[in-house]
Image (spheres, helix red, strand yellow):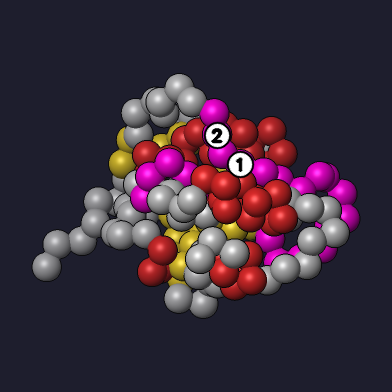
Amino acid sequence: MTSAPSTVTTPAAEEHALRLRLKPKGPTTGYVDGAWWPRSADLVGELPELFAVLAVRLGRIERVTFHLGDFADPPRRIEYDGERVRLEGFRSQRAGTLTVIGASDRHRVTLLIVPSDANPEAAHDVQMAAAHRDGTDTVETLLDRLK
């Protein structure tokens, strides 16, 4: 039995707009802090662009957690900006979410993951709802809007 590589170095992300919506800084409500609509199911290929934006809010990115069933065999670490970032899958994490954690464990962002093949109009609506300051929809309610 072979295990996944422990560290992967990622190439520069393609030049295109990141499909990310975040709730405004400050006290927020709800289950997520916003929504991310990656362009593919390739977690390792998609993360550098996400990190570049979230580092403004979180500082140095240290760790990413996700539900084990959401991504196929990601490595345990990737390199970003000369630093190693741990990737940790858990069965206990709510499916359809990804949490990005800064070096100070107090700074974290939990995002709804909009499937890459989602209908563009529905995906946009779900992203806007997830990023609404007073939004209290559950992850399941938000994802059901894509059906």
Q: Give the numbered dot on residue 86.
A: none
Residue receiving disc 1: 20
Kindly identify the residue that appears in the image at 41 percent across and 28 percent down: 13
Please identify the residue farthest to the bottom as the structure is shown.
Answer: 92
List x then y, in percent, for residue 86: 45, 51
Decide: few, some or many residues near mark 1? Use Cα within 10 Å; few <14, some 14-19, many ≥20.
many
Q: Nearer the viewer, residue 142 or 90?
A: 142
Q: Nearer the viewer, residue 110 or 58?
A: 110
Magenta stretch mostly in which secondary structure?
Answer: loop
What's the distance in space between the residues labelled 2 and 1, CA to CA? 6 Å
Magenta-tinted stretch: 17-41
Residue receiving disc 2: 18
Tell me the element at label 1. strand
Please say if the residues under marks 2 and 1 sit with CB atoms less than 8 Å apart. Answer: yes
List x then y, in percent, for residue 23: 76, 48
Check disc 1 and give the amino acid type.
Leu
Q: Is residue 22 magenta?
A: yes
Q: Is residue 131 found left or right of 102 in the rendered image?
A: right
Total residue callouts:
2
Please identify the residue farthest to the right as the structure is shown.
Answer: 27
Check disc 2 and give the amino acid type.
Leu
